[in-house]
Amino acid sequence: MSIIPTIPYSAQYNTINREGHESPPPILGAPTFVWHLGISPHELEKGAVPDVPLQEMHDWFANDYEMGRENFFRDINSLLRLLQGSVPFSSKKPQVFNSICVPRPWKEEEWTQGEPFRVTQPEHMRFTLWWPDDLKQQGSEPPIDALRIKVHATAYRDYVTLSLYMDAGKPWNGPPFVRGDRPKGNRRQRIFEQVQTIYEKCEARLAGSRGARPIVEKEILPEQDLSNADAAALMRASRFLYSELWDEFWQTLGLPPLDQIIGKTGRVFANFRGLVLATPGIDSSPVFPGSAGDNPFPRFVGNGGLNDRGTASSHDPNEANAVVKAFWPFIRRITPNADQREYIACGVMNWRALYISALSSARAFDWEEESRGSETDIPAGHLPESLINKIVGPSGEEVRLFDSQSGKSGEGPIRYLVLSKGEPHRRQIGRVLDRINTMGTMRLIALRDWTIVRDASTQIQLRGLELDTMMRKWTQKRSELRRDFDKQKQDNPKGGRALQDQEDKALQELADKIEKDLIGLSAALDKIGARARSGLHFRINRSRFYASEFESLVASLKIGNIDTWVAYDQFVTRGLKPAFGFIDGVGSRLLGLRTRLQTVLEGIETSALVTQISATRQNTAELRSIASAVADANRWLNNAIFWLRIFSIVVSILVAAATLVVGGGGPQGLSNIMRWVVERMIP
């Protein structure tokens, strides 16, 4: 008979074992369209913190924190329910976050406010939406024309991410359609047609014709060998794949605008639109499929134009550079004013794919500065900036709206393009996209409250000057007082004690005044960065954490540099490291200023205390002298009383003797004798 042991598992067994596996990446192919949102809680204006005892104050903060989380996740769950409830073929119960979960090892029935603080479970969820051509179509299974949209929602400590991956080639219950196939469904065919337009117009630039060299060997400006019709076709493809397709998805599902769902409690701080395409590059034939078996995976050759050490040019063709330049007519029609911006273009995952994005970089120049306009360098036209709709804002300012994602203060989604070498490996490209989205989100959350931190730097600088001024004032005034009173003591040696009392009083008044100013400065430091969510110290430390995580993810992306282009890690080093270092420096400076302030305050308090102790010591010495004099006087008085008593006795004896001698003198005679004695004994 076998005995099955009963294992006493830890209450946190599942929690610690699942950590690190809670967010599996999506599985997808090409073409895939990505819409990634980062949403953070929006902190409403609150009243003043109540002036109550510490425990009541803690309860107030705890309740405010818990209620804020519940309201935020209530709206996030509303969005998740709307997404899952607006498409057919979804029989499962909608997946939502439970924001009031009591973590192990605490028991739910023993929970009280803040003991412990509740957490969100699950931290990550994923579900699949099937978007058919006809939403009214009924059935037990999605039709062949339904598009697969994988939704990943993740709850972090400070924000929530929502990623929608529209894998256009994957049908229900079948293998994915790839490049060259005839897909099923009207919407899927429209997508593949637009993608095919991009392939035909761009990849043709990689090969020469009739002995001519490829177009990609020429500069990207001016744009050459592109007709007006081709430019218009690429602009239509960009508009459809990055904007109109997602608008169509949102509208056909009948979803309300996002600000009506989460606008009261949440704010979007990250908005990415991505596109994944597969290209054979300079190979004569496409490299399919993505899983290579025992053959090496296809990669862009040439190491970006450099040798393995990055010290000299490569002998292999710079395929990555050629592909980026070949697709540039499409890329310049993804983001307005693309040729005026510095683009990120680099290899990822050891040249398995290319990542290309402007990352919201600023324009380096205007066309009118160097020519009559963009038509000089891009004669084919049909650029995205021509689609910008200019309206008048609430304050009379000009607002430029590019598409449905444009905000009234110039906001808009960051758009990126991923070009896979051949058909991508469905798991690997999913990890690449997940990492790109995660890196971008952490980059932005690390810079959250950037303007507040930047202002805090100036505040710290000025408060530091104020502290230095107070220190100089204390040192100079104290030296002047001591010098003045030392001179007075030399001029008037007999007035030493009175002058010392005056000096002690003046020093105490100076110390009290400086101490009052320092306390006011400490209160002013508490107000620095007061608008930062959860306080400036918390925000800076969270930024440090996310910046560190971001830099770790950048290294894991295995980035390759394309000669003459800016790689993502170079952008991090040149553009982000100074900002991250600045935030870290502000935190160190704030802590250093508080430490200096405390040290100065303690020094002044100690100096004042020493002065008081010195005065007390002198007063004690004088009191001892007075006490000694009083003791001497008491001894003299006691001696006088003793001899007076002796004298009284002697007098009494003499009186008695006189009475006997005189005899009949009578009382009058005795009285005369006593008066005579007293008159001579008492002056």
Image (cartoon, rainbow, N blue to C red):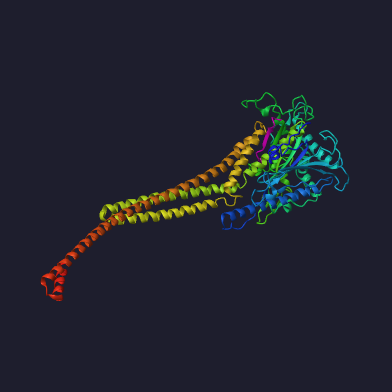
- Vertical relation: 331 (above or below) 351: below
421 falls in the magenta region: no
- Vertical relation: 382 (above or below) 60: above
Q: Is residue 592 left or right of residue 683?
A: right
Quadrant in the picture for the C terminus? bottom left
- Vertical relation: 454 (above or below) 220: below
The answer to whether residue 37 is seen in the rendering is no
Q: Which of 291 and 324 is in front in this view?
A: 291
At which x and y percent is residue 88? 84, 46
Residue lying furthest left in this view?
662
At which x and y percent is residue 532? 60, 50
Q: Which of 263 and 389 is in front in this view?
A: 263
User: Residue 432 sits in which quadrant?
Assistant: top right
At which x and y percent is residue 204? 77, 32
Give the residue drawn at x 80%, y 36%. 196
Q: In this view, does 668 lie to the left or right of 250?
A: left
349 falls in the magenta region: yes
Task: Identify the magenta region.
Answer: 340-351
Q: How many marks?
A: 0
Give the residue drawn at x 37%, y 55%. 506
The answer to whether residue 354 is seen in the rendering is yes
User: Residue 2 sits in which quadrant?
Assistant: top right
